[in-house]
Image (spheres, rainbow, N blue to C red):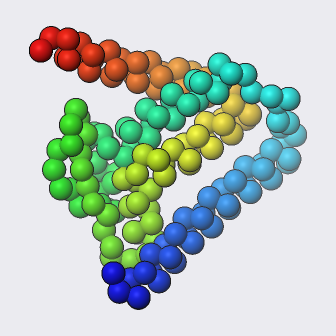
Amino acid sequence: MSRSEGSARIRGYLFALGSYAVLAGTVSVAGRLTGVRLPERFSLADTALVGVATHKASRLLTKEAVMRPLRAPFTVYEEPAGHAELKESVRSDEPAKHAIGELLTCPFCAGVWIASGLTAGLVFAPRITRLVSTALSAVAASDALNLLYDKLKS
C-alpha cells in the first residue's frame, strides 16, 4: 500500500469515527430534548438478548447473500463462503466508500454500530427493540440448530 493509499484509508476511518460520534451525540441530544432517561441498569437478560441479536444482525448485514444488494456499491463479490454467506472484498475507489465497505464486510465492525443502535432502542423504544432482538435471537438459535442437524445427519 502506498503512502497516499494509507492516508486515504485513514481519512475513511476518520469519516466512520466522525459519523459514529455524530450519531451517538444526536441520540444523546434527542434523549435530553424528549426527556427520555437512561434506566438505572440493564438486566443480564437484556444484555444477552442484545448480544445474540447483535451477532445475528451483524452476520446478516455483512455476510448473508440476501443483503448483497446493500453491500454491492461498496464491495466486490469474490465467492461463496459457507451457509448462505458470501466473501466480498472492499472497493477502494474513495476513502468514504472504503470505510463503509469495511463496516459492511466486517461483522465485528458492524457489531459496534448494531449494538449501539439496539442499546439506544432499549432506552427510546424498549418494546419494539425487545421484539426485534427476540426475532433476531430466534433466527440465530435456528441457524445453530440447522448447522447441528446437518452435522448429525452426516
The answer to whether 3 appears left or right of 17 in the picture is: left
Residue 128, quarter of picture: top right
**Residue at image x 37%, y 38%?**
60
Residue 119, quarter of picture: top right
The answer to whether 13 appears left or right of 23 in the picture is: left
Closer to us: 148 or 112: 148
Looking at the image, how many numbered discs can be counted on the residues? 0
Q: Position of residue 79 (x, y in %)?
A: 16, 50
The answer to whether 66 appears left or right of 45 in the picture is: left
Q: Position of residue 140 (x, y in %)?
A: 40, 24
**Residue at image x 30%, y 68%?**
91
| Residue 93 higher or lower than 23, as above or below | below
| Residue 141 higher or lower than 27, as above or below | above
Residue 75, quarter of picture: bottom left
**Residue at image x 41%, y 60%?**
102
Closer to us: 35 or 62: 62
Extreme residue toward the left, this view = 154
- Can residue 59 be seen in the rendering of this structure? yes
The quadrant of the rendering that contains the N terminus is: bottom left
| Residue 119 higher or lower than 52, as above or below | below
The quadrant of the rendering that contains the C terminus is: top left
Q: Position of residue 150 (x, y in %)?
A: 19, 17
| Residue 101 higher or lower than 57, as above or below | below
**Residue at image x 47%, y 47%?**
108
- Can residue 127 be seen in the rendering of this structure? no
